[in-house]
Each structure stands twice: as structure tokens, then as C-alpha cells.
Image (cartoon, rainbow, N blue to C red):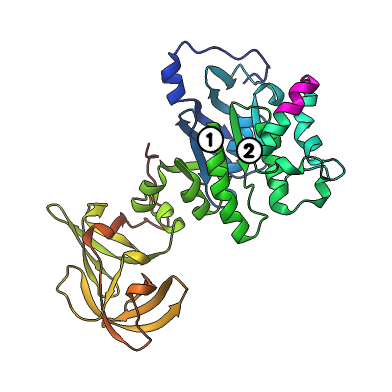
């Protein structure tokens, strides 16, 4: 494969169609020297102009390599990267970082402490030799957008962590990038500040309409901020979907185990007309209307918040008597561990205002068939796989 740097090709696709696939990554492969397996193994996805994509997964899944390949800090072995009508990378083209018109916000902020806030934000414009008056105007505008308009003359060394992160964001958006990439930018902040800045980042992205790619291992962050989420394991996208679809209908067992907190029951399934009957090793029999409709070894996934807890029998489907083993107060909610008569232990989370049970209480649990999601059990320890869901 040639590594020749050439002018980006121009796509003849109509502009409105290109906007729907503004960032397009196709069959991206990357293997680091000495690594036993590829960091990226055929990664493909597309996102519309102005949307917010989160690359989500555990450490080593390939999400940061994907981002670094998009911005030009890594050179893939093969594949194609397009932004709008420009080819950034393919087997004949490799546009250098400074010509990709992208902004990037790093985890470490990369702020110069000996310079003022305004000087930090102005730096990329001065490198581009933008006129002084235009620099001042755009820096002031960027600082106002991130809520730091009053701190332009302050030394960067006097800023808090949250303020430094905003400066790093302002320095990226001041360039008016075609694409904004953010590499775990909130991971160094405390929990309350992280929650607040998530909302501000999402608001700012929507206000500016900047197409953004955000890397994180934090599932709450991904679900709160994204229009689309790509969940990655082992250099492969297992699911590409909206946050709601991702959480409520995980495409693979790995995605189901990674997102949220669930009860995972091993057993056997028998497919029927419109539903599947599942029997667990713990003696629980369940009717399921979602997920895998097959016959054989299976795993049932039930979200802890989808288990209903009530004081007496109500004749519901998938209902069992149980006893509360542990009750934990968590402010707005209660967390329970209950045990059925057959010895199966189930975790339950319920809103505090509608649930007030204590350890030792006799209760009943039930779960709606549409909340029992089945997966074919992995064979010989292998993980389940599925094509990414668009």
C-alpha cells in the first residue's frame, strides 16, 4: 500500500447524500508491530453531518485507534476515511493532520500554564497566520461559547480542572473544524463536574452543529451525550445504534454485559409461536418475546430495573415468590438482592418512593416477557458475534 500524500479526491455524490454520510469509515484495519491481533479489524460506520457519535468500549477495544486514524495521528494498514467530499485516507491518499480541518480535545487538556487563557485559545489561529483582528474576534467568541468570556486575561495556571477543559474545547472550536474529536475529555474531572460538563458539551455541540466523535469507556456518558453509539470489542464494532436501542436491545451478549446492570441466567430455550420458553439452572422458568428465538443452550438477560417487586402475588407472567436477602438505600432508589424458593438470586433496583422492603420480607418478583432478552449461549467459551446494527 502506498503512503503517498496527495490531494484529497472529490466525491461526485450529491451534497445532501454526502451530508447523511458526512464521516464515513470503511473497512479500517490497523495492526501494531508485535501485537497478536489487529487493533482495528474491519471497522466501518457512517454518521450524518452535525451528529454526535460516541465510540464506547473497554480499554484496548480500538476506540482511540479509530479516532487517531480519523484525525491522522495513526496510519491504518488499509481502509478508507472520508469527511464530506474529501478522502482523508485510502490506498493512494493520506492527508496530513494539519490539512484535515479537524479539532481535537485530549484527556490531558494540553494547556500552556505560562500563557493566558486567550493566548492558549489563539494559538492554532496564529499558527495558521490568521489576521490579528480576526484572531481576537474568534477567540472572544469561542470563550463566550464555553462560558469563559470573563477569563481571557487570566493565567491558565490559575484555572480549575473544569475551566482548563473548557479552554481546551474553545481552542478546538476556534478553528471552526469540519469535525471535532474528543478523547475521554472529562475522565480527569470529579463526578459532579463531569455530569455538569456533559450537558454543556452536548448543548454546545447542538448549538454549533459541529459533527463530533467522542471516545469514552463510561457507558453513562455515552448514553447521555450520543446521537449514535458504536460499541467496540477487540477492534470490531459489535453494535452501532441510538442510545435507547443500544440499551434496550443489545445486539450481542458482550454488549448486554457491558451496558448497564443485569441478571444473567444460564439455561435452555425452546422456541414457540411468537415467544420462547426459557428454563434456568436455578429453577426459574420464563417466557420471552425478545432477542434470540431458538432452541438450545441460552442466556437470559434481565435488567435489574425491569424486575418488578411487589408484596403479594398478582398473577403476572413470569412471577415468583421470593425473600429479600439484602436491601440497600441509594437515595433516589433502593437496591435489593432477593432469593426465590428454588435458590436463584436476583438483583432488583426500584424507585425509593414506590418500594420499601427490608431484609427478610416475603415478596413476589415478576418480569414482563418483553424484558427477558435471550441470547444463544457461547460455544466452548467463545463470545457471541453479530453484524453491527445500523
- The residue furthest left is 273
Q: CA distance from mark 2 to mark 1?
A: 9 Å
Report the side of 11 relative to 377 (left or right): right
Count residues near mark 1 (Cα–Cα under 10 Å), then give few for <14, some for 14-19, many for 20+: few
Residue 179, placed above or below residue 3: below
Contact check, label 2 and label 1, Cβ < 8 Å: yes
Measuring from the top left, give residue 372's x and y in whole percent.
27, 60
The residue where tag 1 is placed is 207
Q: Is residue 363 placed above or below 45 in the rendered structure?
A: below
Q: Residue 286 lies in magenta, yes or no?
A: no
> Which residue is denoted by mark 2 in the rendering?
145
Residue 278 vs 36, above or below: the answer is below
For disc 2, the neighbor class at 10 Å (few under 14, some 14 to 19, many from 20) is some
Q: Is residue 292 visible?
A: yes
Overall secondary structure of the magenta section: helix
160 relative position to 20: left or right? right
Q: Residue at x 65, y 60 (%)?
A: 190
Q: Which residue is most to the right?
A: 114
Residue 85 place in picture, x, y as percent: 52, 17
Q: Label for residue 67? A: none
Quadrant location of residue 131?
Answer: top right
Q: Residue 102: percent from the left, percent from the top?
A: 64, 28
Front position in the image: 38 or 262 = 262
Give the mark nearer the N terminus: 2 vs 1. 2
In reply to whether residue 130 is colored magenta, the answer given is yes
Image quadrant where one finds the C terminus? top left
Numbered range of the magenta stretch: 129-137
- Residue 274 place in picture, x, y as percent: 14, 52
Disc 2, SS: helix
Judge left or right: residue 52 versus residue 123: left
Q: Is residue 347 above or below residue 379?
A: below
Residue shown at the point (30%, 68%) measured from the top left: 307
Amino acid at each position: 500500500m502506498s503512503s503517498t500524500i496527495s490531494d484529497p479526491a472529490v466525491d461526485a455524490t450529491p451534497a445532501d447524500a454526502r451530508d447523511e454520510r458526512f464521516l464515513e469509515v470503511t473497512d479500517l484495519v490497523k495492526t501494531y508491530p508485535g501485537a497478536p491481533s489487529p487493533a482495528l479489524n474491519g471497522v466501518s460506520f457512517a454518521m450524518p453531518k452535525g451528529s454526535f457519535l460516541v465510540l464506547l468500549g473497554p480499554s484496548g477495544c480500538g476506540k482511540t485507534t479509530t479516532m487517531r486514524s480519523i484525525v491522522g495521528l495513526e496510519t491504518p494498514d488499509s481502509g478508507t476515511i472520508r469527511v464530506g467530499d474529501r478522502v482523508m485516507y485510502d490506498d493512494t491518499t493520506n492527508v496530513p493532520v494539519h490539512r484535515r480541518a479537524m479539532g481535537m480535545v485530549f484527556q490531558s487538556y494540553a494547556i500552556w500554564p505560562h500563557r493566558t487563557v486567550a493566548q492558549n485559545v489563539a494559538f492554532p489561529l496564529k499558527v495558521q497566520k490568521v489576521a490579528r483582528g480576526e484572531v481576537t474576534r474568534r477567540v472572544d467568541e469561542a470563550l463566550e461559547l464555553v462560558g469563559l468570556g470573563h477569563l481571557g486575561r487570566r493565567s491558565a495556571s490559575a484555572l480549575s480542572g473544569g475551566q482548563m477543559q473548557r479552554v481546551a474545547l474553545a481552542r478546538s472550536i476556534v478553528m471552526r473544524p469540519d469535525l471535532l474529536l474528543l478523547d475521554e475529555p472529562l475522565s480527569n474531572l470529579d463526578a459532579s463536574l463531569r455530569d455538569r460538563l456533559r450537558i454543556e458539551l452536548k448543548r454546545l455541540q447542538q448549538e454549533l452543529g459541529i459533527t463530533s466523535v467522542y471516545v469514552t469507556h463510561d457507558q453513562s456518558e455515552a448514553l447521555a451525550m450520543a446521537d449514535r453509539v458504536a460499541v467496540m470489542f477487540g477492534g470490531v464494532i459489535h453494535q452501532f445504534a441510538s442510545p435507547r436501542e443500544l440499551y434496550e436491545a443489545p445486539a450481542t451478549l458482550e454488549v448486554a454485559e457491558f451496558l448497564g446492570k443485569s441478571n444473567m441466567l444460564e439455561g435452555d430455550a425452546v422456541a414457540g409461536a411468537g415467544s420462547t420458553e426459557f428454563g434456568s439452572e436455578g429453577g426459574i422458568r420464563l417466557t420471552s418475546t425478545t432477542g434470540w428465538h431458538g432452541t438450545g443452550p441460552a442466556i437470559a438477560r434481565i435488567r435489574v430495573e425491569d424486575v418488578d417487586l411487589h408484596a403479594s402475588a398478582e398473577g403476572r407472567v413470569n412471577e415468583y415468590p421470593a425473600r429479600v436477602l439484602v436491601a440497600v438505600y441509594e437515595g433516589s432508589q433502593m437496591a435489593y438482592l432477593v432469593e426465590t424458593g428454588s435458590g436463584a438470586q436476583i438483583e432488583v433496583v426500584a424507585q425509593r418512593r414506590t418500594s420499601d422492603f427490608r431484609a427478610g420480607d416475603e415478596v413476589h418478583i415478576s418480569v414482563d416477557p418483553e424484558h427477558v432478552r435471550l441470547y444463544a449461549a457461547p460455544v466452548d467459551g467463545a463470545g457471541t458475534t453479530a453484524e453491527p446494527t445500523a
